[in-house]
């Protein structure tokens, strides 16, 4: 995304057309607000074009980099069949194939399911891959009972409404999973919060997970992690609009808060529920810089090597890799707001000129002025469990 220009929908036609190209009604896509959407999925709030697929791939890349792995669980034996529900471009399947190969698991076949065929031919990458086109709203899924060793449902909070439908999808995922197989759910919250200074590590933390969080410059989330409402004024506005837009569609703006409870209540079919949640700062919070500055001052005084006043509080605490991960998280957030632009304009009541003014000011604040400096975080998580 070229953040120096206007948002994509704003830069394109402002009209909403039933068919932007004269294609027959069997065409799976429709052009609205200058972007491509899935014709048959009117409740799905996101476009389905290359920029949005890039954002989704970037989010998957970010999550696997932060977690240091493509699966939350570690297979006890070599999995044979893996299903990715709502696979999109199939990027996660490609990443998981590579990760499993590095762990020594070979001969793993992958199946991707989605309402439209967006994935490339992963077989050209040496992946045993099959795509199945199916609408998740139409159950049962076209698979046999006990067919898969691993079933992954990733980022479905924008796809499946709250309530009975989400329960039916969970039941279906359990049905097609082998006994002893693993169900994984990956999600991202769409509402941004600010993490408070110096959050404590989770009680009984996993040493490997904690070391991974330290190395990536992120924070493990537990019930003791202190959060407050987002501090950045532009993200405050987008939070309000996203909340209302998703509420209207009965979609969850904070899915990460619901998943553990949803899985734990399935006591007759699922067991060994575990999770890993991480907060990724969108920048370098002031309290991190201040703590680093004080630490450098103490070191300089003790070693008597630094002249008085030579250390500033602006000294970065981050490695280049950590800074890159945080910048990627910020881009994911900005691009999500861009993809949701038509909905957010509707709920905010902004006209085109007002929206463009908000967008330009937000981009300047977040990218040029480093406005996400009060602990604003993107929250991601993965949950995994076994079928009884």
Image (tube, helix red, strand yellow):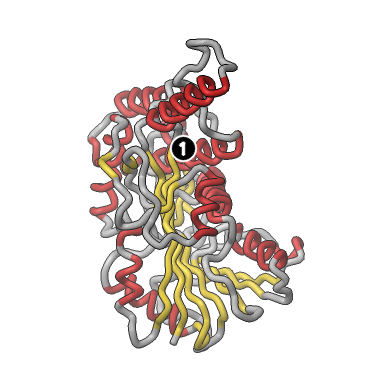
Could you tell me which secondary element the residue under label 1 belongs to? helix
Task: Name which residue lies at 50% across and 42% down.
Answer: 217
The reply, left or right, for residue 211 in relation to residue 266 is right
* Closer to the camera in the image, 249 or 317: 317
Residue at 52 percent across and 74 percent down: it is 151
Percent x, y of residue 314 = 47, 21
Badge 1: residue crowd in 10 Å (few <14, some 14–19, many ≥20): many
Q: Quadrant of the N terminus?
A: top right
- The residue nearer to you, when weighing 131 against 96, is 96
In the figure, is residue 118 to the left or right of 383? right
- Quadrant of the drawing holding the C terminus: bottom left
Q: Nearer the viewer, residue 319 or 233?
A: 319
- Residue 270 on image: x %, y %: 40, 82
Tell me residue 169's x, y (percent). Answer: 39, 74
- Residue 134 lies left or right of residue 170; in this view the side is right
Residue denoted by label 1 = 330
Question: How many numbered dots are placed on residues in this image?
Answer: 1
Q: Residue at x 29, y 47 (%)?
A: 226
């Amino acid at each position: 995304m070229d953040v120096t220009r206007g948002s994509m929908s704003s830069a394109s036609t402002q009209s909403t057309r039933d068919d932007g190209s004269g294609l027959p009604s069997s065409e799976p896509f429709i052009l609205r607000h200058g972007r491509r959407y899935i014709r048959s999925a009117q409740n799905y709030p996101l476009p389905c074009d290359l920029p949005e697929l890039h954002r989704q791939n970037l989010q998957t890349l970010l999550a696997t980099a932060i977690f240091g792995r493509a699966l939350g669980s570690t297979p006890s034996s070599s999995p044979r069949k893996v299903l990715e529900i709502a696979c999109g471009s199939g990027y996660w399947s490609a990443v998981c194939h590579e990760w499993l190969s590095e762990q020594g698991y070979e001969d793993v076949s992958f199946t991707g399911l989605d309402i439209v065929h967006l994935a490339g031919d992963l077989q050209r990458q040496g992946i045993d891959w099959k795509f199945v086109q199916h609408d998740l709203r139409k159950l049962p899924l076209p698979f046999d009972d006990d067919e898969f060793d691993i079933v992954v449902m990733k980022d479905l909070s924008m796809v499946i409404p709250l309530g009975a439908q989400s329960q039916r999808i969970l039941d279906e995922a359990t049905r097609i999973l082998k006994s002893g197989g693993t169900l994984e759910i990956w999600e991202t919250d769409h509402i941004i919060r600010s993490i408070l200074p110096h959050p404590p590590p989770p009680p009984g933390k996993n040493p490997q997970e904690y070391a991974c969080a330290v190395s990536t410059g992120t924070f493990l989330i537990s019930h003791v992690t202190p959060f407050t409402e987002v501090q950045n004024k532009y993200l405050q506005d987008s939070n309000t609009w996203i909340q209302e837009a998703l509420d209207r569609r009965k979609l969850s703006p904070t899915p990460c808060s619901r998943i553990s409870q949803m899985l734990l209540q399935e006591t007759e079919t699922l067991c060994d529920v575990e999770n890993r949640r991480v907060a990724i700062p969108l920048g370098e919070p002031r309290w991190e810089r201040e703590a680093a500055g004080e630490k450098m001052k103490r070191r300089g005084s003790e070693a008597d090597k630094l002249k008085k006043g030579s250390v500033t509080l602006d000294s970065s605490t981050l490695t280049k890799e950590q800074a890159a991960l945080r910048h990627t998280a910020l881009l994911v957030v900005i691009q999500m707001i861009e993809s949701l632009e038509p909905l957010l304009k509707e709920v905010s009541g902004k006209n085109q000129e007002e929206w463009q003014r908000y967008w330009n000011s937000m981009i300047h604040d977040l990218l040029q002025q480093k406005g996400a400096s009060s602990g604003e975080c993107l929250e991601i998580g993965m949950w995994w469990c076994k079928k009884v």
